[in-house]
Amino acid sequence: MASPWLRPPSAPIRGVKALVIAAIVLVMLYPFAYVIFASFSAAGSTMQASLIPSEWTLDAYRAILQGGVVTRALWVSAGVTLVGTAMSVFFTITLAYGLTRTREVPGAKPILYLVLFTMLFGAGIIPNYLLVKGLGLLDTYWALILPGLISAFNMVVVRNFFMQIPTELFEAARIDGAGEVRIFTRIVLPLSKAVVAVIALFYAVGYWNSFFGAMLYLNDASKWPIQLVLNQYVLQGTPLSQFENPNSVPPPAQAVSMAVVVLATLPILVIYPFAQRYFTKGVLTGAIKG
Amino acid sequence: MLRVRWMYAFIIPGFLFFVVFAYVPLLGNVVAFQDYSPFLGFTGSPWVGMANFQALLTGPELIDSLRNTLIISLLQIVFAFPAPIALALLLNSLLSERVKRVVQSIVYLPHFISWVIVISIWQEVLGGAGAVSQLAQLFGGDSVNVMSNPDTFQLLVTLQVIWKETGWGTIIFFAAITAIPQDLYESSACDGAGPLRRIWHVTLPGIVPVIMLLLILRLGSVLSVGFEQLILQQPAVGADAAQVLDTFVYYRGVLGGDWGISTAAGLLKGIVGTLLVLAANKLAKRSGAEGLF
């Protein structure tokens, strides 16, 4: 966007800017770097503030990936994320498409308003808990998926995108004899890849990161997803080793904690570069005019 | 030509979800008017009228958590709200597209990391055994634990929000900045305005409507502060500093079994919050911004 008439500012201003930016980048990245290095450190907590460990080891990862609590929690999170994201995306885009024709479909407009109202007023923690309990979903993985299956905000983002598709395309397809389902899968979806990718990402991140739902609805510790395990063993300080193989010599507790943090962050770091190019496009289509 | 019946096939599953998981729980709020017992259920529990609300408003707990909520909200509005505006202006003033993109991808990242991970990472750097503490000991000082100090906790919470969300918050301001016509910059540059004056007289006025809208909406949700963020840290610093309205409902209701009173607190917060958002929206519209709905 740099126009030819823009000249670089004076040297002192550029210097100050460079310093500020460097400071911001450092503040953002240092904690991540510290945690990653700490997870490979054989010395554990005696790192003495130097970032690079004096002795490298994979013991921490070996210990937690042996098939204990952390391994199981990672699988739970992965499963819930996959199933949840697929279901959420499916039901969000179908509802969004169904609500694009509020004029022709009787009842669609009130339904749209009912959906929008949920963004304004939620029932609160206790009534939701009582509902999940009443439906018999306590201590099931469905409790992590069903209560947040569709986000009204994401639905609005997708609906706005669908509304921008020229209706002539649909008319033409209808004249050619295509049914509504065919129009949806062959015309609407291929044109909406970017927005579907964005909401899929948002849902996936949401499921992977979800903590409170699990804390509320899962008493059975053997079903816990990774975020809850992280809270228990890293933040609340419950020793992890008692649940692991008692015969092996435990690696330093700090390295183990940090390895759990790294493993819980890894999926986000892996998909982040791929998803990034959709952010601006996808967020802006929906967020500006909600 | 539109086959209306098919459209219902698209609508009904999603709508059923909202009926069951958004509207049925609304009815669950009757618990606020009951001395609810899980064994007796909705139908068996005795009705107590407004007694739960009375107990809430006369007891000290609600007032304490309301005060903490408002203090944290205020700190966030004063410090966390302007941060993305400043960062967006700074990044926008960079001439190198490549540097801009790299910095953007770095500052967006924490938004996608869960609160559990963010706090674990902070704990590791700023906690009692963390990097800062080690550094302090290296220079002969005492170990410091910023993470469990109730006196500075509310500032800490604000700093965490700034760290996690500032980068992501710039997106909307970038969008607003892109919408400013380029010739405004060119003509002001021709009139001799330097880079700082162009920011002050062109960029800032150009994004003021978005700033106003977001600020007003933020005021509307003044009763909601990061729930997960607080509930994760409450054990470390104690209720005096960390108890907010949402954590009050959780501790008192789910853990304490005081279903009626905590539902009343949640309902009160929901109603006041909704009224605030509606009022904020009206204010946004009156101030000339587009409003949200």
Image (cartoon, coloured by chain):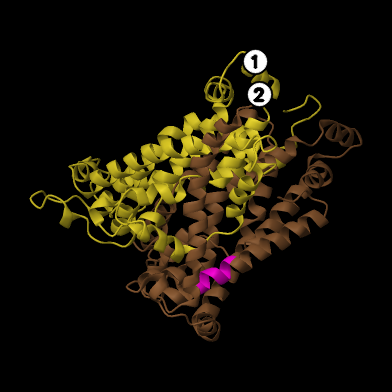
Chain colours: A yellow, B brown
> Residue B257 is drawn in which quadrant?
bottom left
Span colored in magenta: B264-270
- Work out which residue is located at the far left of the displayed protein and give it: A247
User: Label 1's element?
Assistant: helix
Q: Nearer the viewer, residue A256 or A161?
A: A161
Task: Give the residue type that dot 2 points to.
Answer: Met
Q: Are marks 2 and 1 in contact (CB under 8 Å)?
A: yes
Q: What element does badge 2 sit on?
A: loop
Whether residue B232 appears in this view of the structure is no
Residue B186: which numbered mark, if any?
none
Q: Is residue A273 left or right of residue B281?
A: left
Residue in view at x 73 percent, y 28 percent:
A2
Relative to B168, does residue A158 appear above or below in the rendering?
above
Residue assigned mark 2: B1
A270 shown above or below A182: below
- Crowding around mark 2 (Cα neighbors within 10 Å: few <14, some 14 to 19, many 20+) is few
Query: Left or right: where does residue B276 sit relative to residue A256?
Result: right
The structure residue drawn at horizontal position 43% and vertical position 64%, both measured from the top left corner, is B231
Image spot of residue A19 (x, y percent):
60, 44
Residue that label 1 marks: A175
Percent position of residue A223, x then y: 26, 51
Q: Chain of mark 2?
A: B
